[in-house]
Image (cartoon, rainbow, N blue to C red):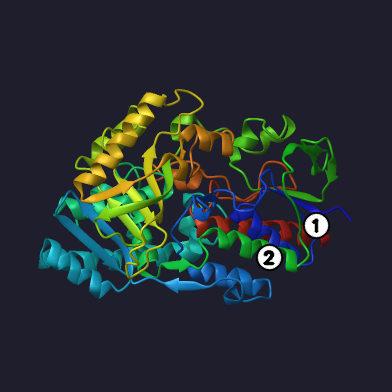
Amino acid sequence: MRPIVIIGAGVGGLTAAALLAAAGEDVVVCEAAATPGGKLRELTIDGRALDAGPTVFTMRWVFEAIFAAAGASLDDYLTLRPVTTLARHAWGPDARLDLFADIDASANAIGDFAGAAEATRFRAFAAEAKRTYTTLESSFLDAPATNPLGLTARIGLSRPGDLLSIRPFETLWGALGGYFHDPRLRQLFGRYATYSGASPYLAPATLMLIAHVENSGVWQVDGGMHRIARALEALAVSRGAAFRYAAPVAEIVVGRSGAEGVVLASGERIDASAVVVNADPQALASGRFGPAASRAVAKMPARDRSLSALTWTIVAETSGFELSHHNVFFADDYSAEFDAIFDQHRLPATPSVYICAEDRGDKPTGHARERLHMIVNAPATADARGLTPGEIDACEQATFAMLERSGLTVAPTADATVRTTPADFAALFPATGGALYGRASHGWRASFQRPGSTTRIPGLYLAGGATHPGAGVPMAALSGRLAARALLSARRSTGR
């Protein structure tokens, strides 16, 4: 029996491996790196493990369903702790606003921050975000990729109100202007576009559903976010999947019947009954897995790429500003930030900064040296016009200066800091130029242009955050589940 070969042990590939193995399939996962996780990376700095990729865990129910489908319990693999404070936000030295898991608590905080009318408008915004998520959960997020007509059919022509409620033809920024009069609140909720690597000025209003996702719960993972990858790996192994690390795939073998196997960089060939690619689809389209496999998906213009990032993963002393676990420091001119990235393909002069203070929970711990992961949005042009060392150094200086103006002092040292640039991300994730979210969610068409689970080549499937339904840890897991479903469905159809 030829196994199913999964290329890549990111969250999408790990999910597909666990579900396919649980269904009785013979599964082999080939991963170029030495550990699982993909973008869910972990670094060791100063003897301590730090998350160096996604830092927010939401949509717990997705993972509960995946583990249950494999005959297991998520609680047996991960310890999750719900957070009370979703994030702490700062504008300069004086303005602070916390959002909470409890909507009433957030409304009260917004009322104290910007007035009672804004608190009332926030409740209306939260209600619309919930309606949008509810409309799209089963019809789009957990369903195979489709086109606008297919989505309309799924939602139902008898429900025109639901169709209109997702507001695909408005920008997120424009829709937020109808809710919030305080520009800081518009900026805060506009940041949700960056969760899918997009600009709030170009992304559809549909992305307000992310607000509902966060209001439904954010959890801290004991041991860090990388434990999610380890848990999925352990689940897959317990169901019979085999993992081969430091085993990059050089070519996907395509024959008359479709995908027939892979050839590793070492020259070893593994015959396969099907292949699942958990990599950016542009790695396929650009020929990274051989010319025969390049026709599996369409090439995407570089101009349609999502955000990249400039990050600092640090163990350092901090003082001044009292950090929460998740923190955002906003630049004054938000539009200039995205103009610089998407129009001018350069780093913003004064960036907004996200900081995950990994040792902080709802209650400050006061560690003398704490673990920080800092992120600044950046252009994904590493394979065209790369950023110069001078540009990166200037952005770093502007970043730490902006934090100082907001009252936070971070004292990093060279031996306890890892800086990751768009060029580094491009090397980690080939054919992306450093883009971390696949196609940018710009305009109403973008969500329908992401590749789905199936490809033009029979027996070749896709999973990962650059495929349908989108970017983010739970979305990548959903993509893995969709790939497994599509593969098993094809098997049943062929058997009949």
Tell whether 232 sits left or right of 53: right
Q: Which residue is mark 1?
A: 494
Q: Is residue 30 above or below residue 302?
A: below
Residue at (62% x, 36% y) in the render: 283
Which class describes the residues within 10 Å of circle 1: few (<14), some (14-19), or many (20+)? few
User: Residue 94 falls in which quadrant of the image?
Assistant: bottom left
> How would you rate the neighbour count of disc 2 (Cα within 10 Å): few for under 14, some for 14-19, many for 20 or more?
some
Q: Residue 123, relative to residue 41: is it above or below?
A: below
Rendered image quadrant of residue 164: bottom left
Q: Amino acid at mark 2?
A: Ala
The local secondary structure at tag 2 comes to helix
Mark before the other along the chain sequence, 1 or 2 = 2
378 and 371: which is toward the camera: 371
> According to the image, label 2 marks what residue?
234
Q: Is residue 301 left or right of residue 93?
A: right
In the depicted view, which residue is nearer to us: 359 or 135? 359
Q: Which numbered disc, 1 or 2, marks the residue closer to the eye? A: 2
